[in-house]
Image: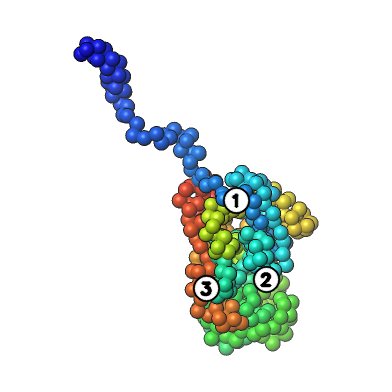
Amino acid sequence: MRTTLFKLLAPVMAAGIAAAACGGTPAASNAPTTSAAASAALGQLPVPELTKVRIGISTPTEPVQFAETLAERLGIYKKYGITTVEVTGFEGDGKALQALVADQVDFFVGGASTAINSVVTDTPVKVISMNSTTLTDGLFCGKDIKVPADVKGKSVAISTFGGTSHGSALLMLKGIGLTDKDAVITQTGGEGVRIAALKGGSVGCAVVGMSQEKAMKDLGLNLLIDLSKAKLQWGRSGLMAKNTFLAKNPNTALVVVAAALEAQNSIWTDTATATAKFVDWAQVKPDAADLVMKDFLTYGSRSMTFTADAFTAPRDVLASVNPAVKDVDVTKAFDLSYLTKLKDIGFYQKNNIPTTN
């Protein structure tokens, strides 16, 4: 029996000795070890709970809200398991939010202010990624206002209290080392009205889009700060959903964020294709689309990440028209875990997406 047992074990022992001689060791588990398997695991997304999602776009003609529909037009959602995506355009955040609350859409793309307001309601929503946290206004002032100290006590023209231009004014004052207590923020009207008031000298400074920079300087007006270069965050436009939906469909939310993130980055890596898709979506002329898409490259967020600062300024602006949000904890208006998860599983790495803006 010993002889028989030795004969049976001999081949096994010989194989073990040969493996040792070649430096081999027994496998510790059945986990894939080939480079191909490791590559497949990098950035792998979970199976979404839903195969159909509905997304609302509150401003369908703006590139700042384009990534979520571009992902559908490029077939990215389908690639990750969501086979049907319905994208609907709305006229502003208010109508889009109504559709979200009524369960007519699952996600919508809009400003951080919407999520902040929702914190004090029965239907809270959270922003889970940001297409842009950069405003593109400048603080233009009269000929005698040349340095930040000159702004003290002067009027700063905005459109309306509680609006984006109001937020721009607060950020720009912060950027030059002042507060809203140092200047008089004045509700004047649209950009054309603000420019006229500045030219006429009835206001000291005005919030004006940087697209007007040359015209402003030709008038001898002074630019004190350009928000597009100031690195001061404002939650301009982001993907959001109801808290209840996110809790029930975490994988679906992760896949939607991933698809939008991939599409957003394609605007940088293949601008021509993105622009052609934008022409079809926004129904604008190719030349106009080319200009706005190239401009978006200067203020869009490739990483789609953000910080609480992107919500603090909007909250402070909202408080001027809705005191109920004055003390809102802004961390309840967003959830960064989806973007963090995509970094952790290597989705950013796999798709060559920068992790910071």
* Left or right of 43 on screen, residue 65: right
Q: Is residue 166 above or below residue 12?
A: below
Q: Earlier in the sequence, mark 3 or mark 1?
A: 1
Q: Along the line of sight, which residue is nearer the eye, 347 or 265?
A: 347
- Looking at the rendered structure, the secondary structure element under dot 2 is helix
Say which residue label 1 marks: 50
Circles 2, 1 touching at the beta carbon (< 8 Å): no
Residue that appears at 58% across and 69% down: 123
Whole-percent x and y of residue 76?
63, 47
Q: Residues within 10 Å of mark 1 (few under 14, many from 20)?
A: some
Q: Nearer the viewer, mark 2 or mark 3?
A: 2
Q: Along the line of sight, which residue is nearer the eye, 182 or 36?
A: 36
| Label 3 to label 1: alpha-carbon separation | 33 Å
Residue 192, quarter of picture: bottom right
- Examine the rendering and report whether any part of residue 294 can be seen: no
- Give the numbered dot on residue 94: 2
Q: Label 2 is placed on what type of residue?
A: Gly
Colouring convention used in this rendered image of the protein: rainbow
Say which residue label 3 marks: 312
